[in-house]
Image (cartoon, rainbow, N blue to C red):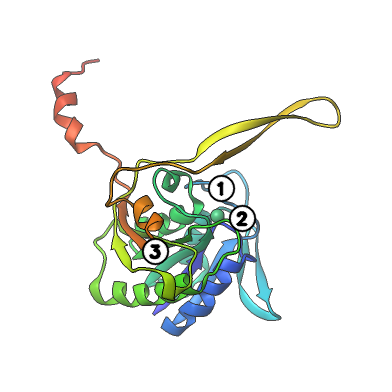
């Protein structure tokens, strides 16, 4: 099995190292990841600048390719230029921070996997629901299991799996739930500050304390101590509204 690994926290983050170390059991891995922190870049790609790629070592050994682009850039570059064989699987993560609800739209982690799916390759996005004291062990082990399942059971074309895990050791996680995307997002606001020259600047910050009555949602699986696995797709058409919009009889 040929596996392409990327993330949005950067190639030197702890989460991608745990993921790569674990996925080595499943086959040949190739890591192509951003050279710096690229969280919340969404599905951006780089078109006005060249992409610089250098090899990255970790613990004194070759680890992968660090690119001056976004997660979507890294997946394109990995598949179309760096890998000799087309991958059987793309895995993005393990992200520091959950990617549930509308956060999926901003997430570079999910977009790395979405790019894989757009290119016709089964893809997984793996996120850990914490920003502090991460324990990546359960997420790394579950990624291996899921890679095996995807190989055996297949994913429909255009569908990827968005996986979120609570920050707990495997023994304390209650199980795995298949979920739907919740209608939740960060409550963000801007810190208004002043720089040393007296100019105003703004820094986005926020908290994530949403409530969601939908028991089948990604948010509630995580809150209940379960792993959340959501099948997602990138056709954004609102099919239910199409007939009504046709009734508008739009004309030039
Ligand atoms: Mn991130």
Residue 119 visible, this orientation:
no
Give the residue drawn at x 30%, y 41%: 236
Task: Count neighbours of disc 1 (C-alpha within 10 A) and say few if under 14, some if 14 to 19, many if 20 or more.
Answer: few
Give the residue drawn at x 66%, y 71%: 56
- Element marked by disc 1: loop
Horizontal side of residue 197 vs 89, given as left or right: right
Judging by the rendered image, the residue that carries numbered circle 2 is 51
Nearer-the-camera pick, 198 or 7: 198
Quadrant holding the C terminus: top left
Judging by the rendered image, the residue that carries numbered circle 3 is 124
Whichever of callouts 2 and 1 sits on the residue coming sooner in the sequence is: 1
Above or below, comparing residue 252 to residue 182 in the picture: above
Give the residue drawn at x 61%, y 75%: 63
Is disc 1's CB within 8 Å of ligand 1?
Answer: no
Kindly indicate whether the residue at mark 3 contacts the one at mark 2 (C-beta within 8 angstroms). no
- Element marked by disc 2: loop
Residue 58 placement: quadrant: bottom right
Whichever of callouts 1 and 3 sits on the residue coming sooner in the sequence is: 1
Residue 68 placement: quadrant: bottom right
Task: Count neighbours of disc 2 (C-alpha within 10 A) and say few if under 14, some if 14 to 19, many if 20 or more.
Answer: some
Is disc 3's CB within 8 Å of ligand 1?
Answer: no
Residue 188 visible, this orientation:
yes
Q: CA distance from mark 1 to mark 3?
A: 22 Å
Q: Nearer the viewer, mark 1 or mark 3?
A: 3
């Amino acid at each position: 099995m040929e596996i392409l690994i990327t993330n949005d926290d950067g190639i030197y983050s702890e989460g991608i190292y745990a993921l790569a170390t674990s996925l080595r059991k499943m086959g040949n891995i190739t890591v192509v990841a951003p050279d710096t922190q690229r969280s919340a870049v969404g599905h951006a790609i780089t078109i006005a600048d060249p992409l610089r790629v250098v090899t990255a070592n970790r613990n004194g050994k070759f680890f992968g390719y660090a690119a001056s682009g976004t997660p979507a850039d890294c997946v394109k570059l990995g598949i179309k230029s760096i890998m000799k064989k087309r991958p059987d699987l793309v895995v993005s993560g393990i992200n520091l921070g959950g990617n549930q609800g509308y956060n999926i739209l901003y997430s570079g982690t999910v977009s790395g996997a979405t790019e894989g799916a757009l290119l016709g390759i089964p893809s997984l996005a793996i996120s850990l629901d914490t920003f502090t004291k991460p324990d990546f062990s359960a997420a790394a082990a579950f990624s291996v299991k899921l890679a095996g399942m995807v190989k055996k059971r297949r994913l429909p074309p255009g569908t990827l799996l968005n996986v979120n895990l609570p920050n707990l050791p495997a023994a304390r996680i209650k199980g795995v739930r298949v979920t739907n995307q919740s209608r939740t997002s960060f409550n963000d606001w801007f810190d208004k500050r002043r720089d040393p020259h007296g100019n105003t600047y703004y820094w986005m910050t926020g908290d994530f304390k949403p409530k969601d009555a939908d028991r089948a949602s990604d948010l509630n699986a995580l809150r209940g101590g379960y792993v959340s696995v959501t099948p997602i797709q990138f056709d954004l058409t609102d099919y239910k509204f199409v007939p009504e919009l046709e009734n508008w009889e739009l004309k030039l």
